[in-house]
Amino acid sequence: MPSSSPADVDAPPEAALVEPLLPNTSTEEAAVFSLIPEEQSPFVGTTSEQPTRINEPEVLEVAVDDSAWEHGEDQDLKFQNPLFAFIFLSQAIALMVFGVHGIKTFLSYQKEDDNKNHHPQDDDSGSDDIDLHFILYYARHLLFAFLATVTSIVMLSASVLSYLLRQTGATRRMMEISLILSPVSYALSAIGCMAVGLLPMAGIFLMSTLIGICYVVAVWKRIPVAAANLAVAMTAVRAHQGSLVGLGYTLTFVAASWTCIWCLAIGDIGFRDSSFFWQCPAGSNQQDPDCSLTSGGVCVGLLLLLSLFWTLQVIKNLCHTTVAGVVGSWWFSSAPSTHDEEVANGDSLIQESTPSPKQVVYDSWVRCSVYSFGSICFGSLVVGLLQVLQFILRCGREQNQRNRNSSSGLALCICQCIVNQLERLAEYMNKWAFVYVGLYGYDYWTAGSKVFNLFKARGWSVILNDHLVTRYLTLLQTLLSLLSAVICQFWGWLFVIRPLSASLRQAAENDPDNNADPADVSALWYSFFAIGFVLGMSLSSVLFRLISSAVDTIVVCFAESPNQLSVLGRQTGQQQNKPILKPSLANEMILAWRQVYPQECGF
């Protein structure tokens, strides 16, 4: 077979070869398909009968006049809302002091208790030593099972996240499956209840099935937009996967450690002066049901509860804000042509040279944990106060139920409902405000007002109420938690249940009067399942929170600079000669927004 001449290489492909490759679609959809230039094809110059290779599609143009709304501007590195940062750090340091002192208090109390209960005449029997040895043996095995479970869940979650980040093209299909799965599960539950004769429960499940079907029909058309946003967000997370996963687990460890310190601090404060916190009848202790908290004890307890809620909210929002800064740096990694002058003058967040992923995560972390830390503390305090108020109302309702006082029960129920809605509203506002804090470094109030003014100018009030991504991630988290529960059962059987059953069996053989049943370990199976499920929910939520924060940031960035989406599909990265964002994903997001929200997207 003769090879092609240079003239044949420069010639355009014949229409007979091109037309079968292009579907009979509109001009807009046909623009997605393109051919590799023949001079770049490995088949050129070898044989004239080889097929033509198809390259990534051309990126659709997004030309929007973004001067109609206000854009965020990079703020100077200065401490935002420093008063709230000072208050938070002051209470954190004070609680840490009490927590460290609580360790000493606990150890000294334990030592005194051991000396008080130690009787030399019991040394001959050796029963205490045997019991202590037995307890230490299984405590060690429980620790091994716990560590093995945590390690397995972390590895499983990281593997699932890595797989999902590489399956960006399948997000729409997986989201459709997750949406259908809910009414299907309700229908199966209804059938199961009818099979066993539980007709009232079957009716409830049937009603839930109908509601689920109505919800699926109502939101089905929004799936392309949610799937496209999720795919682009996962691409951004994948570019910084290692550093972000490490950050997420580090903050989770900090939250768990802080909870332990908080518990130790409560013990230390309570042991200092119990009469200040408890009012008990003469001759009774705190275990007496007639004891009640004093007004001072109630105030200190609520402050300690606020400290816990506030700190956990700060840790959570710190992760969310850092991810927003990282994804924003990825989105604005190359400037559109309209902003070339700003880049040249240094007036924009966009940098001409893209730093390494580790450096991007580190810079965002420093900016959020140092300069924007006060803003994060401010917004987190609002939610923390509402959570404390929610706790007070819940305790009030339980007290009324115990006293059978129905006169104020309705009022407390209404108040709790209002506070619950206010808490959700505050968390919803924080979610978007902290994205702007991470992107530009504004203070809390300015960030909140600017981001909601942006959404108002774009007419995106309906778009922001879309919970499809959260629903999809919650389903994945639940499935991972169930798998984690099974893993915990395996390690519990290996380290605890199996040796314990053997010990009980041997004790029954040695002592015929022993009534212990070696097979009666069902409670341990249920306990390990519950522990594994809780650990799975906690550890997997770290990774899915990264994706959820990235999706929120993508929505804000797309609202502010939609033209940047086309630039990302054409701009190549520094490490590989590949686009920062696959052109197919960019086109999918553009076409999805045009289809679902033709007026709101603006193009």
Image: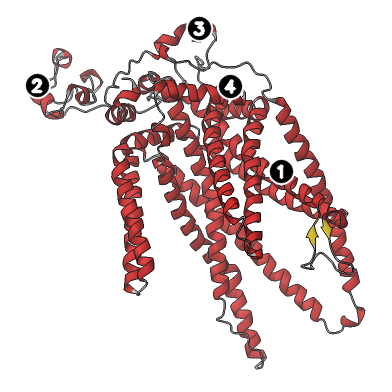
Nearest to the eye among marks 4 and 3: give it: 4
Q: Is residue 470 visible?
A: yes
Nearest to the eye among marks 3 and 1: give it: 1
Which percent across, then down, holds residue 400?
64, 60
| Nearer to me, 80 or 581 | 80
Which percent across, then down, holds residue 555?
43, 29
Quadrant (top left/top right/bottom left/bottom right) for the C terminus: top left
Tell me what residue is drawn at x 82 percent, y 81 percent.
Answer: 126
Q: Distance between the residues labelled 3 and 2?
A: 45 Å
Nearest to the eye among marks 2 and 1: give it: 1
Q: Name the residue under label 1.
A: 307
Mark 3 or mark 2: whose residue is earlier in sequence? 2
Q: Mark 4 points at which residue?
A: 446
The amino acid type found where label 1 is placed reads Ser
Q: Distance between the residues labelled 4 and 3?
A: 27 Å
Q: Name the residue under label 3.
A: 344
Mark 1 or mark 4: whose residue is earlier in sequence? 1
Nearest to the eye among marks 4 and 2: give it: 4
Mark 4 or mark 2: whose residue is earlier in sequence? 2
Colouring used for the render: secondary structure
The amino acid type found where label 4 is placed reads Thr
